[in-house]
Structures are given as C-alpha cells and as structure tokens.
Amino acid sequence: MKGIKIVTIGGGSSYTPELVEGFIKRYNELPVSELWLVDIPEGKDKLETVGALAKRMVDEAQVPMEIYLTLDRKKALRNADFVTTQIRVGLLEARAIDERIPLKYGVIGQETNGPGGLFKALRTVPVILDICSDIESLCPDAWLINFSNPAGLITEAVLRYSNIKKVVGLCNLPIGMRMNLAKLLNVEAERLHVDFAGLNHMVYGLNVYLDGKRITDKVLDMISSGETAGETVKNIPDFNWEPGFVKALGVLPCPYHRYYYQTAKMLEDEIASAKSEGTRAEVVKKLEAELFELYKDPDLKIKPPQLEKRGGAYYSDAACSLIHSIYTDRRDIQTVNIRNNGAIASIPDDSAAEINCVITKEGPLPISVGDLPVPVRGLVQQIKSFERVAAQAAVSGDYYEALLAMTINPLVPSDHMAKQILDEMLDAHKDYLPQFTNAQKV
Amino acid sequence: MKGIKIVTIGGGSSYTPELVEGFIKRYNELPVSELWLVDIPEGKDKLETVGALAKRMVDEAQVPMEIYLTLDRKKALRNADFVTTQIRVGLLEARAIDERIPLKYGVIGQETNGPGGLFKALRTVPVILDICSDIESLCPDAWLINFSNPAGLITEAVLRYSNIKKVVGLCNLPIGMRMNLAKLLNVEAERLHVDFAGLNHMVYGLNVYLDGKRITDKVLDMISSGETAGETVKNIPDFNWEPGFVKALGVLPCPYHRYYYQTAKMLEDEIASAKSEGTRAEVVKKLEAELFELYKDPDLKIKPPQLEKRGGAYYSDAACSLIHSIYTDRRDIQTVNIRNNGAIASIPDDSAAEINCVITKEGPLPISVGDLPVPVRGLVQQIKSFERVAAQAAVSGDYYEALLAMTINPLVPSDHMAKQILDEMLDAHKDYLPQFTNAQKV
Amino acid sequence: MKGIKIVTIGGGSSYTPELVEGFIKRYNELPVSELWLVDIPEGKDKLETVGALAKRMVDEAQVPMEIYLTLDRKKALRNADFVTTQIRVGLLEARAIDERIPLKYGVIGQETNGPGGLFKALRTVPVILDICSDIESLCPDAWLINFSNPAGLITEAVLRYSNIKKVVGLCNLPIGMRMNLAKLLNVEAERLHVDFAGLNHMVYGLNVYLDGKRITDKVLDMISSGETAGETVKNIPDFNWEPGFVKALGVLPCPYHRYYYQTAKMLEDEIASAKSEGTRAEVVKKLEAELFELYKDPDLKIKPPQLEKRGGAYYSDAACSLIHSIYTDRRDIQTVNIRNNGAIASIPDDSAAEINCVITKEGPLPISVGDLPVPVRGLVQQIKSFERVAAQAAVSGDYYEALLAMTINPLVPSDHMAKQILDEMLDAHKDYLPQFTNAQKV
Amino acid sequence: MKGIKIVTIGGGSSYTPELVEGFIKRYNELPVSELWLVDIPEGKDKLETVGALAKRMVDEAQVPMEIYLTLDRKKALRNADFVTTQIRVGLLEARAIDERIPLKYGVIGQETNGPGGLFKALRTVPVILDICSDIESLCPDAWLINFSNPAGLITEAVLRYSNIKKVVGLCNLPIGMRMNLAKLLNVEAERLHVDFAGLNHMVYGLNVYLDGKRITDKVLDMISSGETAGETVKNIPDFNWEPGFVKALGVLPCPYHRYYYQTAKMLEDEIASAKSEGTRAEVVKKLEAELFELYKDPDLKIKPPQLEKRGGAYYSDAACSLIHSIYTDRRDIQTVNIRNNGAIASIPDDSAAEINCVITKEGPLPISVGDLPVPVRGLVQQIKSFERVAAQAAVSGDYYEALLAMTINPLVPSDHMAKQILDEMLDAHKDYLPQFTNAQKV
C-alpha cells in the first residue's frame, strides 16, 4: 500500500514539531510516507531549523517518513493526499499591528475578533484561495485542512469563492473546552461528550453528557456559580462570568465569548497587558524566539515540552487526529468547521459552521442540532453576517465592503471609528493587501 | 348602521388631541360614535383636561361622536371595536430614570433601546397582558392597536403570552422615513413606495420606488454621500453616516440604527444633552407641561400646532389610518408590527416583525420579502433574541432572565456592567415591577 | 400623458374580444393607446377575423385605442408596456392528442394535469422563453402577463430560465371559486375574501371571510355535506366530494383537485365523454368554429355572449384587471402566479406559487401565509417537484428528464407506462418539440 | 458492573431467536444479564415455544444471560435498559385482511403502504403509546427500540403523542440495500457507504461511496441499465426499473418505491400472487407454522437457518447492533428512524425521518443532508403528510381523519373508494380498533 503524502504550508511554523510528533505516534495506523514542509522565501531560515528538527525526530522514532523542505509550493502539492495550512501572512509583526491599532481607539485588538480578525482575514483569504487554485489543478482529491486563523471565516471564503469542496477548518478550542470541563468535574475527558455548535471562536456547548447521561444543568450551575478549572485558552483571561448569567444563557459559552459578553473588562485587561508585558503577539514573539533557539539544538530529537506554552496546544494534534480519522474511516466525533448543510437551522446551508461531525472516509459529516437556543441565536447570526461581508471584501478588495464589515462587527462602536481604524490598518498592512491597492473611495 | 366604539387606554396622554382630530376628519368613512378615554387614578387630572379639549374639538367639528372619560377600564372595554393603548407606566419620571442610570455607566440611555428599552418593557408588558386578558373576556372581537413603546417587543409579548390574535403594534417611524425621503427627493410622498422590513426601531427600507420605478441605488447614493432632509425623529440627532457606508449596506437604515452603527457618537451626544438641556424625558416633560397649559384653555377647540414638537407626529394619525383601513377594507399598504408568518425569512413565523402589510377587513396581511440582505440579517436577529428574552423576563419576573436580556443587548458592554445597571434600575423602578419583588438571586 | 402599449401574443385567440372589451370598459383609468395583436403565420386568418372584430368594438365604443395586427413579433414588442401571452402551440389538435393518448393507457388525459400537462409545457416553455428573450432586448421594462397553460409551470420556467423578473402567471380559477362561493352563500362576491395559496390548478382556499368575519368552518361544512353552486370550471364535472372529506381536509380544494382526490371517477368520466361528445379539445374546437363564424359577422360590434360558454370566463378580464391595478397602483388583492419569495413556507423562495398578492405599481407583492396545513402540504410539494423537473426537461430536451417528469407525476401509475405514453406523445407532437429531435436514449 | 436488562415486547415472535443469537454473539461487549420476553395471553403458546428455544440457545452458548417469560408487561418493564417492540396487533390474520380488502378494489394491499399500512398503524399506534406510558413510569431512562411496522409512522406517533424522547424506529431495509449493492458491485459490504435519507420504506441512497470515493454515478448507471443483484426484500418482486429512469432520478430508490413508481405492475403482481400462492401474510403464515414446528424440537439449540426465508433478515440483528452501539458508544453509522432535528430540510424538525445517524451513548445523532433532490422531495413530503394525518387519526379515533388519511394516500385513487375501503376495513378490524368504536359519521 502506497503511503500517505502530506503537505504542510507554513511548514516553518513553531507548531510543526507537534504535527510531526502526531504523525510519528500514529504511524502504524496512518503511514505517512512523505511530509512536505513548504514555506515562503522570507521563512526559509525557520523552515530549515524546523525541518532539521523534524528529520531528527523521525530518525529518533525510526519511522520511514520522508521529510521534504521546499519553497516551491506547486512542486510540493502534486498528488498530495492532505494539505494542511498554518500560515501567518505578515507574521507576528502584522498580528501586533492588528492588536495595537484598535487599542488606540479603545477597541478590542485581537487576532480573530474585531478589527484584528477582519484584517487577518483580509490578508489571509487571498493566499488561501491561491492555494485552493493550486490544489484544484495539482491534487484535486486532496483534503484541505486549514488551521490558519480566522479558521471559520476562511472556511466560509473557501466554500464561497473556490472550487474546493473537501475543506475543513480546524480549531483546538472545543478540545480544550472538553479537557477543561474534565478537570472541573474531575473525570476522564473520554467520559465526557459535548454537543458543540456555532461558529469558530463563537461555539457553544449545547449539552454536556457524562457516560451518556445529560449533566448540562449541573455543569451550568457550577460555572454559573464561579467554579472554574483555570484557563482554556492561553491568551484569554479566565474572568468569572457574572453569577447566574451562564445558567440563564442555558448553554456553555466558549472563552472567546468574553469578547462579546465581557467587552469592557477584556478591553481594560488588553490595555493593561499591552502596557506591561506587551500584546499577545509581542509575548508570543519572544516565546517563538526561545523555541527556535531550542529547535536549533542538534541534540533535540523530540517535541520540546516548552512548545505547550505557546498557546496552540492540541492544534496540530487535532489536525493529525482528523487526518487519521478520515484516512481510517474511524467515525469518531470531532468538532470542525465545515459546510453547515442544514445542521444548524439559523445558519445558511452553504455557510461554514463549527459543528460536531462524525469523521469518515468521505469526510466530516455534520450532526444536526436544529435551531440554536433563542438567547445565543442572534449573536451567532451577527458574526455570520460579519464573516460573509468580510470574506467578500477580502476577495473584492472593495474599500466600502471592508468599511461595512468593520462597521457591522459588534466590537466596533461606530461607522466613523470604523473608518479611522480601517484607514490606519489598510495603510499599516498595505504590503499584504494587494487587492486593496487601487480601491476607490467616494 | 351601528357606529364604532373606540377605547383609548392612556387617554390622558398629550397625544390624544391628534387622535381625536384623526377621527374627526375621517368621520364620514369611519363613523366613530363612542370614544372612551381611559386612564388610571394618577392620571385623572390630565384625563379631564384632555377629555374636555376632546369634547370641545368634537363640538366644534359638529360630528356626533360621544366622548367618555373613565378610570374604569373594564366598563370602557365592553363591546369595543378597537382598543388603542398609549400608556407610559411610571410616566416620564420613569423614562428619565431609564435614560439617566445607563448614562452613569457610559451606556446608551434611551426609551426603547438598551437598558432603558428593557426596563420600559419590563414595566409595560404585564400591564398590556392584563389589558389583553380584559379584552379576551369583554370584547374578544376587538382589534388591539398598541402604540406604547417598545412597540415591537410588546407585540412579541402579546403574541406569545396572551390569547389575543388581533394585535397590531404601531410606530410612526416608517411614515416619517417616507416623508423624509420625499423631502430629500423633492417629490410628493404619495409617489414614493418603500419596502420596509425588520423590527420596530430596527426597520430597513429594502427598496425605494418612485412612481413604481426602483430608485434604491439613487437614494442610497444620496444618503451615502451625506445628503439629508433633516431629522426624521425628534429625539435622534441627524448625524451623517460615514460616506459610503449606507451604499455598502445596500438598504436604507432607520434613524434608530444610529444607536448601533454610531454608538460612540450617540453616547457622547446623549451625555452632552443630559448635562445641558436634560435628557429627552426631561425635555419632553417641559413640553408636556406647556401643552397641558394650552389644553386647558377653554377657547382651544382644535389640536394645537405646538403638539407636533412633541415628537410623536403621525403616531396617532397612523392609528386612525390603520383603524380606518381595517374598518373600510381599504387595502392600502402600511408598515406595522405583526406576527411575521413567514414574511421575513430570518425571523420565526410566530414572532413579531415590522413589515409592510396590506390592510384589510381581516386585518393587516404581511407582504413577504424573503431573506433580509446578509449585512443586516445578523443585527436584526440579535435584537430579536434580545426581545424574546426580555419579553420572557417581563412575564416571569426572573432575575436571571432579566440579567440575560440585559447582557445580550448589543448596547451593554459586559455581564458585570449589566448586573450593576440591572440592580440599580430594578431598585429605582421597583414600584412598577411587582413581578420582580420576590425574585431570587444566587 | 403617453398612452399604454399592450402586446398580445396569440392575438388571434377566440378570447381576444373579452380582452378588448376589458380594455374598453377600463379606458378612463387605463388609457390603452395601442393594442398589438400578434400571431404566427398559421394563425393569420383567425388573427384577421378577431382583429377586425376588435376594431369594430373599439369604433363602436368610441375609444381612441389603436388596434395593430401583425405576424412580426419583434416589431410589435418594441417599447411595449405590457405583454400578454395566450398561445396554444399546436392548437387544439395538439390538445386533443394530449387528451387522447393518455386515455388509451387508462391515464387522465387533460390540458394541464398528468401527461397532457407535461406535453403542453414541453411545447410551450421554449416558445415563451423565446418571447422572454425578445422582451429582454426590446421592452425590458414591460410586464409579461402569461395566461397560456400550464400557467404555474410556465411561470416557474420563466423565473428559472430567463432573465425576466416582471412576470405574472394568471388563472381565472380563484376568481371563479370566489364567484361560486358567493352563489353558494347567496351573497355578493365583493363581500367575500378568500386566502388563496398553493400552485396553479392546485390552489387551496385556506380561509373564507364574509365582511371580514372568518366563516371557514361554515363553508367547509356546507361543501362537506354536499352543497354546491354548480360548476366553477367548464371542463371539470362537479362531482360531490365524499361527505366529511372536505371538512377533514380543513381547507377549500379547487375543482382541479378532483384529478387527485377523485382520480378514478374523473377518469371514468373522461373515457365516457371521449366516447360520446369527444374530449374537451374536440368539444372546444366546435365551439371555437362557431365563435369564429360569429366573429366574422360585420354587424357584430361587441363581445358575443356565446364566448362565455368557451370556458375561459374571467380570464381576459383577469388580465385587464391585473394590468389596471399595476398601472394605477390600485392595491387590490388578486391571486396570481409569482415568485414565492417566502410567502408559502413549503415552496422554495425562488419557485412560482399561486398566492394572494396586493397589486401595486411595483407589481404583485405576495402575502405571506406561513406553512400550508399538513394534509395538503405533501401534494403541493409533489406537484412542485413535477413542475421543476418538467420545466427543466422542456429546456434541456433531455429524454430521461422527460421520462422522470412523467414518472413522478402522481397521475401516472408506473415508469413503464410513463415510457410508453412518453414515446407515443413525443412522436405525435414531434413537430412542436424541436428540442427533443436528437434526444439520446440508452 | 451491573448487566443489561432487555425487555422484548412481542417476545413470542418467530424473529426472537435471531435476537437471542445477536445478544449471545455480542455478549462480551454487551453483557445482557436479563432478557424478558413479554407477550399477550393469546400468544402464550408461541412465547413458551420461543422462550424454551431461547433458553436452550443460551445454555448451549454458555453465556450467563437469564431468559424470563411473562404475560405481565409492567412487571417486565421495571428498570429495563432497553425495550424492543416487535408486536403485530391482530396477528397475520389482520395482515391478510390488510392485503385482501384493498385488492378487491384494485388498490395495493400491503403491510406498510396504502390502506394496509394505514390500518396497521391504526391498530398499532395505541398499543405502542400504551407501552410508552408504562415506560415513562417504570423505566424512564430506557431506550425504546421499535421494529413493529409501519416503523416510521409509529416513531412519528411516539414523538408527537407520548412523552418518550428516547425512541428509535428500526428497519432492516438500508442494511439490505447496502448488502445488495455489495453483491452488485462484487465488493465487501464494509467497503461501501451510502448516504441514506428519507422516510421509512421511502428511503433514498443519496450517494454511494466505495472506500471513501464517490461512485454514485456508476451505481446509478448500473441500476439504470438493468443490472441487479436479485431481491433485497423478500416480499417485493425485483422488477427492473425502466432503463434510464433511476439515472434521471439521480438517487438510489428503495425496493418499496416500486409501489409508487411502478404501481400498475406491482398491483398486477399482487393480484396474481393472491390468486396463486396467497398474499404475503398467507405465505408467511405457512412459513411461521413450519418455523414453530422447528422451534419445538428440543434438540434445536441455535437459530435455525430456515428463519432467513421469513423475510426479516437483519432485523433483529439490526436491533442488537443498535443496542450494542448505544451501550458501548461505538459511534458507527446506522440508518434509523428518529426525530429529524433539521437533518433533512424538507421534513419538519419535530417529525420522524429515516436518516444516517452516528450511534453514541447519548443515542443516535442524525447526520445533516440539507435538502433532498428536487425529483424526490415531493413524494417524501406527501408520505409525511399521510403519516401525520394517519398518526393523528390513530390517536383520535376520528372517522373523518381516517378518511382523510386514506384519501390523501397516493395509492388510493379517490375519496369515494377511500370511503368504501375504509368502511370495510374498519368493520373487519373492529376488535383491534377500540378507539373507533363510537366514531361519529356525518
């Protein structure tokens, strides 16, 4: 049997060792014979560092997995079985800008929410669509597994503006939430099942089961009265919810919901952090530098434990697990971003949703949940409206569509401020936004 | 032919003379033989003042319409054909509180939006449901025409929590928007038609027609580039939209959309006004006092022109016009709040929507518009989520449902602030919120 | 003010005098200055006969309406305001074939239902789409008012396969049903209102109102217990419904529903009629010959009363009335075939439905009815499935799509019989089905 | 760990040995400690015969599963984990009547379709609802696994008219179809996956995959051109589809679709069979008598191979497999009847659908398929309309609701014939239809 060919675009990422580890430990069931790490010229050094570590890891583990390093994406893609994308257009510098500029205006500056999320999408969507176009001609049967952020919005864009149907957007958040619940309840995570549904970074746990028994009310009571198992996501402070709020909401919010239900506090915290240790991008940049120092050590032959501090824990593992399940038709349930297809009533069939799926050889099949509960239905719709307008703006390069996306984002408090932030960010990111170069203004 | 019996609850309102004028001028086609003005004991003086003016108006006009004044609602309702409700639970004092408390927290304080809108609903819904219960037993065939605010939320509550089916919520906003467009385009309002759809105080003009030709793009261009015909609504400043925004939105926003798309500026303006001339309620209070002075003049036998400054222009006229159209099966198109029944795809069939209807003897029949455009669909959903939770809280008196409603309102920036505002407002309004007296907290 | 230009395609039809009469009597409000009667060369004689009568009628009435006769469709269409289509591709001979062939197989042979309806669509749709294409280039602002059968299916085809949006399909059935109810109840038709919804020739009366009071139950009881006011439609026998059936159905069926709920009896009756006086087409052919004899009489200057026997009473009048209401923005309620746009929940937004609309200058606006009642929802869906497949087959000329349409039609009892009937009818009609000339078979 | 308690109502059925075998062979993973076989007094003899065989089977297999025989349903149900229902109200005699009476009128006489299906539902629904009521009080956490026919309609009735939420309707048809496809393609069934969706006995294969590759077109081509692997269902003749029809349909029909797409031929065949070897019930009765003779043999200690001829192959195995998957949280995909919950767009959320589900400890979770293809959507809706009216009639005992159900069934050609068949069947089955005893007629 022919081995599997994986292509990882953004292969020079600090996350790659986790991915390599994931493939190594699954080798018996998931025989990856070729792993191509692709990057752009600006990332050549990192690619070589990470690639060398990957090769040492594979040697150490004694699995016959070939590691290829290349800057030639097209060459890499030919006949790939799975393509994973973990790109960061503009690198952490761009992310820091996404964080700093909105903050100046008293607006949340964050990687995937608010103006920052919009600009990450504007920079990333065209590159991903370009990759889609390569996939279409070079490996049309491949699965595209994207974990570049904003993962939901990018899935939306791929579904609407490319010919690729086999696309999955991936996030480690639902896994993290389940792990966290397990800690809170002091049980094995395997015994828990959560009905996740919503959008990426806007996903809710509709019900929680322990050994098949619904324990939703108990869990909501615990969280509602302030019990917590500590942070789920590295970059989101674990502020308590107002007592009683989560119970009244009736479903489990995700950590990112704090940006919407606790905007004021989150903003305050962001401003304070930015002044002290720096924004998240700035912190991560230091962590990354340290990681790459470690990676260079020729004696390092495993994924270093320090990587877990980076914040993306389970991300690459989630990708391996998804590929594993597709390849082996494992039929486990994973929460991924995929064409909604009716699974959530208030999201259009042809839009992306983050939803529990059973993972089969035919891909993830979404499990239907009907309508979302009344109190959360509206916010989800609003973010979906934003995502659709943002995806369209990313493709069209139309200034006013971008202004519209910025204005209808619930974290931006006015059209005038939207315009100011938009103009400053368009200018700051102009090298990565070629589609806006000639955008017409009134 | 038996004449028509109208019962106006909140008959002592300063708007009543407009209503009386409306009935007088339509008398030939709409023979109102009895107009019952009902009020509560606290409103006795105003009722008498307004009632006396009403009688003078009727005499002056020489129409055989009998005016009845009473504090006994049940007596008035028996066999009514139409019941109009224009109540203000807690009077303008309560409205001023609705405006002042949120402002202290840097949150919009407004009659129908944000925390103020929530509390107006919490005070008003139980009274309206009580009236519904009287209607059910005393005049089950009557139409209930409500123009107490928040008119959409109240229609939602009546549809969900009473047995009354013949209910219409009324707002003067769509009429005002059309008038305003007419001024902007310098044409007769009659030549314009607008496809209105959305929710109360969150209604959009989907298309504009002049003499049956679609001129939507032209109108959006004009507004988008800053042209304006002055204020539509007395209490909403006519800030320009950011150039290009309305064009990108693709539909005509209503003045209240400024609270959502221009939150920062509106808040700033509210704070400034509160400091100078006082909040809107405080301004109106003075206007009202002046009006009542006028009303007392025994020589006044018509609706005084000063009433138009009050802000509710067309409101009572809209009510007369609606009653006229139902009574005569006139089949004109009016924009009202009614059971959606599928007319707007993204709103549940059994929820209230503000939508163009053809007005027949069988009541308003909603004209189907399919799905709202993507950019506005989300915000409308979010407000509908808020309205449903708020209506439920108003009925249940559950503290946490109220907290939930407050928190998911897009104008309230966090659960913690929601709680603070909620607690302060619950206390300030406690005389008008008997259902919350024994509300349990965690 | 410029007068109105009407173009009637199929102008040589025996119905034309009713149309002319309709325009004459509305002349004051609907000043038609040009009426172009268009026909094909084969219809030249009839066109001239009818055209001459039309001119005499106009002269007699002394209205300044110019009648033009032409075989040049393109010339006629230029700058038309309204285009009406009343064509019969293959004439009554083709209709007789549509009736006779299915009967041979023991299957309903009927103009608009079953195999006959399918073939009328296969012949007519391409011609109508051709007309649409002319309209698009020659009079893009014109309204297309089609009353060629099957009117619903043709509207579906225009909506899906042309660029014309301003299309209305017209049927006299709802008018006839209301007239009939008026007779049954012994009241003026004007006092009755019926909520019509469904598909063409598959429309239901959801509710009946007399002077605005719901009398649905009373009407269902009457019909359910066998009361009747005689035939509504000339060609459908007025068999009683099984006592209690209509009451249990809960809504008012239309006469054509007998083909579905009384198939056996209708078939029996058709077979008997075919043997005695001939099929409906054969009967009509004689009537038409007689009518044309009358029309030739140079002393005839009005619509002869004998036309009413023809079966299409109110048809042309319905067209005039619709045009009148659009032109004058009359805002009355008429039942027409139009883009559903959400008005009936179980029909796709972009499909044609027969539904009450308020008729405005902007065209008919559909009144939302929500979901159809459970017992009738299924049959309506099934016919809509048939209509969509049939429309597609008419456009594609694909043999197997036609076979599919025939097989899923609920009046055709098997795929094998479907094939036999299909083959025989394709052959019999081959001159009018150029799109099937080279259809591939397995 | 406590063993599992299973209660099988209708335990005296000839299928029971397959069920017992299924539990025996899964014992290691599914430790059934108690199997209660329940029957009614009339079935005591059969229960004892089958029960004795079951005990011999268990002994032979040396598994510690206790077999209990009882006529006391309530006693059996206490604390059950799973309840399976395989009842036949009125036994095969009633089924023969369901087949014979319609045939007299030239109408399909069949266990689950047409008038026979309606009457099986009328007899069975009240008994199942009675069982539901016992489950509610005696074992509220148990799963109800029904495989009494008509399984879809009964699931609908349980969902609408009982408080039981944990209900699954089971059919062996999808398994049989997949097996059959495997034979046709000459591959292992495990390599095939089919997207099943629709209603019970009206299920379609939307797509077929071999090793995860879509081979739908190939399969449709094969079937469309007459290739077949022989009968899927014992009682449905394997008539070829008209060449090209299945291809045009675009999805895989199930054998029962022949009743709708090949009505004429199926009826002819039924009439011929009824004359020669007897109706299906009559044939089965002989087979059953033979089976019970076999079962009495004290040396028989396994499920006799002759049982497979009975026609219900895989049925009991499907039940065991479903229970196994729920108990072990196996997360395989099975096709079951369950609350639709949005999985199929054209079926109401709260109705039963037959749909692929992933089977978890929390029960079957339906996989969303969006909208059914246009050509099949209508028929599915029509059967769902029938099912809902029939379920309501079974509960209400209203004569006219039953008449309505019969008339709207697509296999019944007229309201008059519906009434005749209804009256004759109501009379023939009156002992099993107590709810209709006092039904009022007009």
Image (spheres, coloured by chain):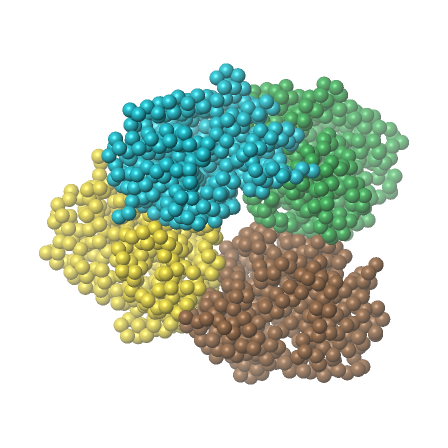
Chain colours: A brown, B yellow, C cyan, D green
Q: From the top left corner, tell me how far across and down residue A259 is, in percent.
A: 52, 69
Query: Farthest residue in the left direction?
Result: B299
- The residue lying toward the viewer, choosing from A233 and B191, is B191
Image position of A133 with respect to B341: above or below: below
Q: Residue at x 77, y 77 (%)?
A: A53
Q: Residue at x 40, y 29 (%)?
A: C46
Q: From the top left corner, tell me how far across and down residue A11 is, in percent.
A: 70, 73
- The residue lying toward the viewer, choosing from B54 and D357, is D357
Q: Is residue C167 left or right of residue D266?
A: left
- The residue lying toward the viewer, choosing from D197 and D166, is D197
- The residue lying toward the viewer, choosing from C380 and B329, is C380
Image position of D21 with respect to B272: above or below: above
Q: From the top left corner, tell me how far across and down residue D401 is, in percent.
A: 52, 29
Q: Is residue D346 left or right of residue C210?
A: right
Q: Residue at x 52, y 46 (%)?
A: C161
Query: Farthest residue in the top direction?
Result: C276
Residue C16 seen anywhere in this rendered image of the structure: yes
Q: Quadrant of residue B399?
A: bottom left
Q: Is residue A53 left or right of residue C337?
A: right
Q: From the top left corner, tell me how far across and down residue B232 is, in percent.
A: 30, 62
Q: Quadrant of residue C27?
A: top left
Q: Residue at x 15, y 60 (%)?
A: B294
Residue C15 seen anywhere in this rendered image of the structure: no
